Amino acid sequence: MRTPTTAGAMTDAELRVTRERLGLSADWLCEHLGVQIRTWRRWEGGTAPIPAGVRNDLTTITEATRQLAAALAATARETGQIVTYRNDDAYRAAEPDSVYPSGWHRAAAAAAAESVGTEAGIVYRDLAQ
């Protein structure tokens, strides 16, 4: 366990939990943030300090996730369904402007499902009515 050296610094555990909760791979985040995978592994492994900017970047992604989850939940309350995507190809076909992978969308769908409870089921776009 690494203790942050600066007040408010992100810990290795926070980094991994946040990444996993967002449905993002370390590879995707490295590409998105412009860092080497070995650097990311050192951050998640607790052997290198995590720059403050990483927390800021993840906060931005978390907010985008919350917004998508809220929109999916609102639609689910009307339709009874939360629509998500099987894979990146299906997601890109439906949302070509999104910078995020399909795993991120599925994570937002899971958050939406938590907020609406059993009112809605999760379906893949190709199965949505």
Image (spheres, rainbow, N blue to C red):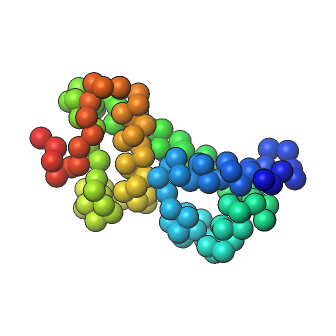
Q: Which of 72/109 is in front?
A: 109
Residue shown at the point (35%, 26%) measured from the top left = 116
Q: Position of residue 111 (x, y in %)?
A: 43, 37
Counting every numbered tag in the picture gives 0
Residue lying at the far left in this picture: please name it. 129
Q: In terms of image quadrants, where is residue 52?
A: bottom right
- Asked if residue 12 can be seen in this view, the reply is yes
Left or right of 98, for residue 25: right
Quick check: 85 above or below 41? above
Q: In terms of image quadrants, where is residue 16?
A: bottom right
Quick check: 15 above or below 47? above
Quick check: 115 above or below 69? above
Q: Which of 119/8 is in front?
A: 119
Left or right of 52, for residue 92: left
Q: Position of residue 104 (x, y in %)?
A: 43, 52
Left or right of 88, for residue 58: right
Residue shown at the point (47%, 52%) measured from the top left = 23
Residue shown at the point (50%, 62%) measured from the top left = 25
Q: Position of residue 117 (x, y in %)?
A: 35, 25
Residue shown at the point (36%, 57%) measured from the top left = 102
Q: Position of residue 119 (x, y in %)?
A: 27, 24
Q: Considering the image in quadrants, where does the C terminus appear?
A: top left
- Asked if residue 55 can be seen in this view, the reply is no
